Image: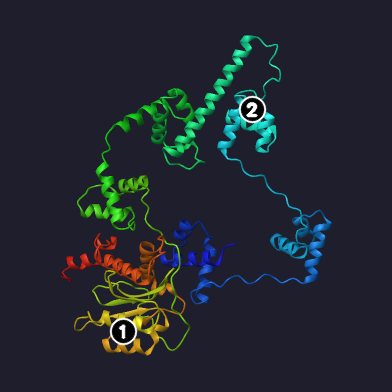
Amino acid sequence: MYSREEKVRAVELFVEYDMSPASVIRELGYPARATLYAWYDEYLENGGDIPPQSKRRRYSDEQKRVAVDHFFEHGQCLARTLRALGYPSQELLASWIEELEPGKRSRRASPPKIPDEVKEKAVVDLVTRTGAAKDIADELGIERATLYNWKRRLLDEEVPCKMPRKPDGRTIEELEEYAASLRRDIGRLELRRAILEGTVELLGKDRSADPKMLTNREKTVLVESLRPAHKLNVLLDAVGMAKSSYRYQRSALARPDKYANLRIRIAEIFHENDGRYGYRRVHAALKAEEVVVSEKVVCRIMKEAGLVAKRPMKRKYSSYKGEIGDAPANIVNRDFHAEEPNTLWLTDITEFSIPAGKVYLSPVVDCFDGLCVAWTQSTSPNAELVNTMLDAAASGLAEGERPVSHSDRGCHYRWPGWIERCERYGITRSMSKKGCSPDNSAMEGFFGRLKVEFFYGRDWKGWGVDQFMDALDGYIHWYNEKRIKMSLGGLSPKQYREALGLAA
């Protein structure tokens, strides 16, 4: 069962990825293709939203009492009661029991999980005879059999699980042999602990990581750090690595890194753009600097350095308030290509919610190259927000330029102020169909990139509204002037217009 938020996220990604169910399923891991199409139909039917699930079936007080009585009369088993009566769910029955018979239901607490470090220390104490097995087990609240099971597992079941209760009567040679076996056990445990600690502290892996699943390069680094205290063949056997592979990796580590300078420049480009560039844009930036390197190398270096571009998280603000009058036809019909500037404009409103309040952004985007022609910000999504934005955009129109302005069916674009301005500036209005966000998908894509690269994943506590607006204004300037687009040949919208001689 998926939540409403998960369904909406899947549908919005479906729209953003040009109606490709495979891309959505690859990124989210859900749902099935047919389910995604069903969610999309429901999304359209409800005006760009998916309503929450209908409430649960209501049961009478008599049905509740019958179910609770059956639970206590037949062994206090939730599943048995459900099978006998056919209702309700286990969660609902448990809530009825707490409501009608509070505190009467017996509960069985699961034992606390014991960390691996505590288990290893207990086994070491057992093997070295620091304490009696019964005392060690009692201190941890476990059975002695559990303690011996830990011992067999940590020692790979290569030693006997019991020590004779009375060593008397054995020869000196037998006692010495037994003492030698104990020393080997202790050495094996110490080696295991050293390898696990090196995997976590030296390589930065999770505590649950298996040392035998490391790469040969990582295993070599780990073995080199432990060689002063342990034999090489013992270390290689413990991490599961052939000696020939170890020798090759050791020689490779000794060679100078031919990508040392490139790693530094890639990290600089990534951080200069606030972590907004993936490996393709980083590669394009390097290409503009005449650095010859393949995309695969850039991808590998970024992966090794943990440089991951920001990803989408949430949905956009919707200005749709229902039908308030006649709307113009959709003359764009999802063709968002323009051969010249100021031919086709897109607009919409999006919301940013920060601890200090809400901020609304209203931009105009030119389909020729994605340039944000004009934008306004406000703490209220009112008519002034969109009207002043249109005035600013129209002020840059040359004589004879009459663009088409495409929007969704938001109320802002159907009020008299907007209509009057469009007529005054010679702008042709175009609107999406009701509740059909793909009809304005290029604008949705702009908002998606903006929020991923600027808004999501940042802590906005302590930011005032004016400070946030200044930062957002700075991002859009960067977007226009510096952010490279692969569709423009690795140039920003402003650089692209300058290259074509359309801007000074």
Q: Quadrant of residue 396?
A: bottom left
Q: Which mark is first along the chain, 1 or 2?
A: 2
- Is 119 placed above or below 364 here? above
**Distance CA(mark 2)–CA(mark 1):** 88 Å
Where the N terminus falls, by quadrant? bottom right
Of badges 2 and 1, nearer the viewer stands: 2
Q: Quadrant of residue 412?
A: bottom left
| Residue that mark 1 sits on | 428
| Outermost residue toward the right in this view | 73
**Residue 342 screen position, x and y as percent:** 25, 77
**Residue in the picture at 34% in, 86% down:** 418
Q: Secondary structure at mark 1?
A: strand
Q: Secondary structure at mark 2?
A: loop
| Residue that mark 2 sits on | 131
Is any atom of residue 347 visible in this view? yes
**Residue in the picture at 37% in, 48% down:** 306
